[in-house]
Amino acid sequence: MMKTETFWKLIAQSIEEKDTLDKNDQGDRLMEILTPLDTKTVVGFHKRMVELRKALDFPMMRDIAFMMGYKENPTAYEGFRNWVISLGEAHYKKAKKSPAHLLTLKDPNLFVVGRPYFPDLNFVSSGAFYTKTDKGILDWEGELEKFNTRQPVRSTSRSDSRIEKGKDIDR
């Protein structure tokens, strides 16, 4: 998985390079930044983004998302957490520590067409992969799966062999 520091550097670069007030432009910049990188790095970026988003899934963050208009919609809540990530490391850390920090943000550069929502962050890594490789969604999913299965292979233990023979291991 991509190092957290590298992930945040890429997010910072995408913020610096966006040309307009439209936060979606940040997604375009990020895709351009990721496209020349190798597939393992692009997959690592995606995995780190998913991990950081999961870390924002806690009751107080849900309450703030609700207050900011996202009700109980899981897709909208995911887009909201993506938006928090897209703000960069400093805002992410403040929001994780105190989600109410997000209610204080007023700068229009921080929003997507006036809203705290950025679902496109889900697609920048896959978009970079498609652009780089001319491959499709099944290939992308295959790359993600390869990353998921890169765990040390466990040798067959005695209890595993008893399971294979249909024996009860609790005896």
Image: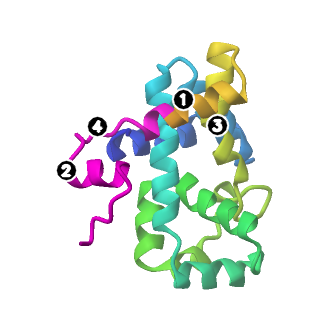
Which of the two residues, 142 or 65, is positioned nearer the viewer here?
142
Tell me which amino acid carries mark 3.
Answer: Val
Q: Residues within 10 Å of mark 1 (few under 14, many from 20)?
A: some
Question: On the rendered image, what quadrant is the C terminus found in?
Answer: bottom left
Q: Is residue 158 above or below residue 34?
A: below
Is residue 149 part of the magenta span, yes or no? yes
Sequence-wise, the earlier of marks 3 and 4 is 3
Give the residues drawn in magenta, as a range.
146-171
Sequence-wise, the earlier of marks 1 and 3 is 3
Marks 3 and 4: CB-CB under 8 Å? no
Is residue 8 shown to the viewer in this render? yes
Q: Residues within 10 Å of mark 2 (few under 14, many from 20)?
A: few
Residue under label 1: 143
Residue located 50% across and 63% down the image: 54
Residue lying at the far left of the rendered structure: 158
Where residue 46 sits in the image (x, y, percent)? 52, 41
Which of the two residues, 138 or 74, is positioned nearer the viewer here?
138
